[in-house]
Image (cartoon, rainbow, N blue to C red):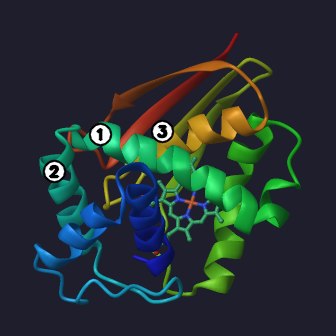
Amino acid sequence: MKGIVFTGLLDMVEEQYGYELVDELLTENDLPSGGIYTTIGTYDHAEMVTLVRALQQKTGIPIPDLLRVYGHYTFRSFSRSYRMFIDQATSAFELLNSVQHYIHVEVRKLYPDAELPQFIIDKLTDKTMIMRYESERKMADFAYGMIEGCLDHFQEKATISMADLSGDGSRVEFTIQKE
Ligand code: HEM
């Protein structure tokens, strides 16, 4: 998993809870990297799981909620640092529809070792989008937050529902219904 995902998480924790909690997360957990992340470095996904579990214990916030808020935060931060990818779209559906065949393709050019999910669009009309998420990393809640962040960015309102097709979080269907 790319360092940018780790530094983003730690930035969010610092912003919301202060540096002390970041320090505790990094020193109280067994992190093979030593807790030193650079944005372009690559680290074991297991370290992300360790950090999110520890954060859940410290804050009492359930892991799915933490991942969702983190996804939302990440979209906002990506919309600043990767504006060129966001600006090519004029609506949330257009952007979400471009993640698999454009945005994440460009991400892979920048970071050849990125571990990216698959997104399959099963239905797309003016009002409804059905998008399937597939990844061994089981970060659908993070994807949920990214979708929320994307809707906010375009100032659009929609209801998002989520169905776990695999039972273990590796294949999840999102239905995004605009008002
Ligand atoms: C400017 C837009 C975007 C950029 C620059 C971007 C970039 C990235 C990067 C760098 C990673 C980390 C890869 C790794 O750790 O090896 C990632 C992972 C991920 N991205 Fe994107 N992304 C964007 C938009 C989106 C959107 C809109 C969604 C949701 C619909 C999304 C869903 C995910 C998920 C769920 C992961 C976690 C990895 C996994 O689940 O397997 N991304 N993305």
Q: Is mark 3 within 8 Å of ligand 1?
A: no
Q: Which residue does the numbered mark 1 point to in the structure image?
A: 64
Secondary structure at badge 2 equals helix
Q: Report the label total.
A: 3
Residue 26 position, x and y percent, is 22, 75
Type of the residue with mark 1: Pro
- How many C-alpha atoms fall within 10 Å of the one at disc 1: few (<14), some, or many (≥20)? some
70 in relation to 156, above or below: below
Q: Residue at x 24, y 44 (%)?
A: 63
**Horizontal and vertical percent for residue 96?**
68, 44
Residue shown at the point (72%, 68%) measured from the top left = 81
Q: Nearer the viewer, mark 2 or mark 3?
A: 2
**Distance CA(mark 1)–CA(mark 2):** 15 Å
Q: Quadrant of residue 23?
A: bottom left
CA gap, disc 2 and disc 3: 23 Å
Q: In the rendering, at what x and y percent does residue 44 appear?
A: 28, 80
Of badges 1 and 2, nearer the viewer stands: 2
Q: Is residue 149 above or below residue 53?
A: above
Q: Quadrant of the C terminus?
A: top right
Query: Residue 29 appears at what percent x and percent y?
Result: 12, 74
Indicate if the residue with disc 1 has its beta carbon within 8 Å of ligand 1.
no
Residue matched to label 3: 144
* Residue labelled with disc 2: 58
Residue in the foreground of this view, choosing between 148 and 77:
77
- At horizontal 39% and vertical 39% (from top left) the residue drawn is 172
Type of amino acid at the residue the image marks with label 2: Lys
Q: Let me know if residue 133 appears in the view.
A: no
Residue 133's mark? none
Sooner in the amino-acid sequence: mark 3 or mark 1:
1
- Residue 140 picture quarter: top left
Mark 1 or 2, nearer chain start: 2
Residue extending farthest to the top is 179
